[in-house]
Amino acid sequence: MCNQQMSRYHEVQAKRWKEGKMWHPPYSLYYYSCYMHEIHHRMLADHYDALARGERRQNLLNSLKEGGYILYARHAEATMGEDQPTIDLEDCTTQRNLSDRGRQQAVMYGETLRRLGIPIDEPILASPFCRTKETAGLAFGEPNVEVDPFWINIYNLSSDLPLEEEGRILTELTTILESPPPEGTNTLIIAHGFPGGVGLGEMSNMGTVVVKPMGRGNGYDMLTYLSLDEWERL
């Protein structure tokens, strides 16, 4: 409304100036008033948006503290070396491994979840790759990590699998993600990102998808995705 009024006002003022009835180009305190009104309106909108985001974050944190969720996290930054065509899971030199920054991310991830008071069921589940095992070990301690070979399948989804094999993997994934953790805790899985549009989708280093299991045969809900920075802001 204010913008429409300003537009009409300036049309009249511009006409008067062209007709020589004004000694200076059209300008008004009304324009300034409307401008400040718009700025104030935007500031209020940003303020209430921030409050709403804060409330959603607090609600999520409260829910996680009560347990009943699955946290599926991608490993930390791994830019050292590269995955060889034939990977030996017992030989880290045939794989991409964590960088120094990745190790810092892993430590920070564990510290953040502990600081937030989020109960995690142990052992932490990890893919057999060196980068996933190291991420889990740095975050929660090696004795608290259990290697689960199923999560190799998620890595394999990025290759050219037959549709039947991809379907089998995703069906088994659903069975895992629809199963609730022990009461009062959350299950944590540290594995690999997914191809875009498949499974839980693409993820950044140490990004986490929060999943709500609905029980055997009832599937699961993907509640939200949290980057490492977003975890730190909870």
Image (cartoon, rainbow, N blue to C red):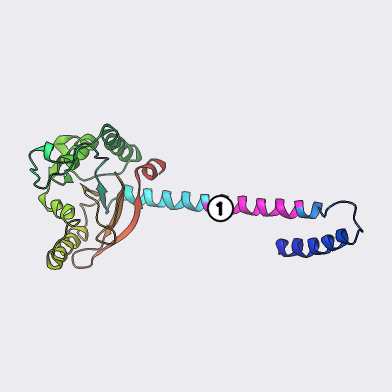
Q: Residue at x 31, y 59 (%)?
A: 222
Segment tinted magenta in the rendering: 32-49
Left or right: where 113 falls relative to 32: left
Left or right: where 84 falls relative to 229: left
Q: Residue at x 21, y 53 (%)?
A: 181
55 is within the stretch colored magenta: no
Q: Residue at x 90, y 52 (%)?
A: 23
In this rendered view, identify the residue nearer to me: 60 or 233: 233
Q: Quadrant of the N terminus?
A: bottom right
Query: Quick check: 76 above or below 2?
Result: above
What predominant SS class does the magenta segment belong to? Answer: helix
Q: Quadrant of the C terminus?
A: top left
Query: Quick check: 151 above or below 214?
Result: above
Q: Position of residue 142 (x, y in %)?
A: 16, 35
36 is within the stretch colored magenta: yes
Q: Quadrant of residue 79?
A: top left
- The type of residue carrying mark 1 is Tyr
Q: Quadrant of residue 30?
A: bottom right
Q: Position of residue 81 (x, y in %)?
A: 19, 38
The residue that label 1 is drawn on is 48
Q: Residue at x 10, y 45 (%)?
A: 87
In this rendered view, identify the residue nearer to me: 33 or 92: 92
Left or right: where 138 falls relative to 27: left
**Could you say whether the residue bearing mark 1 is in a helix, strand or loop?**
helix
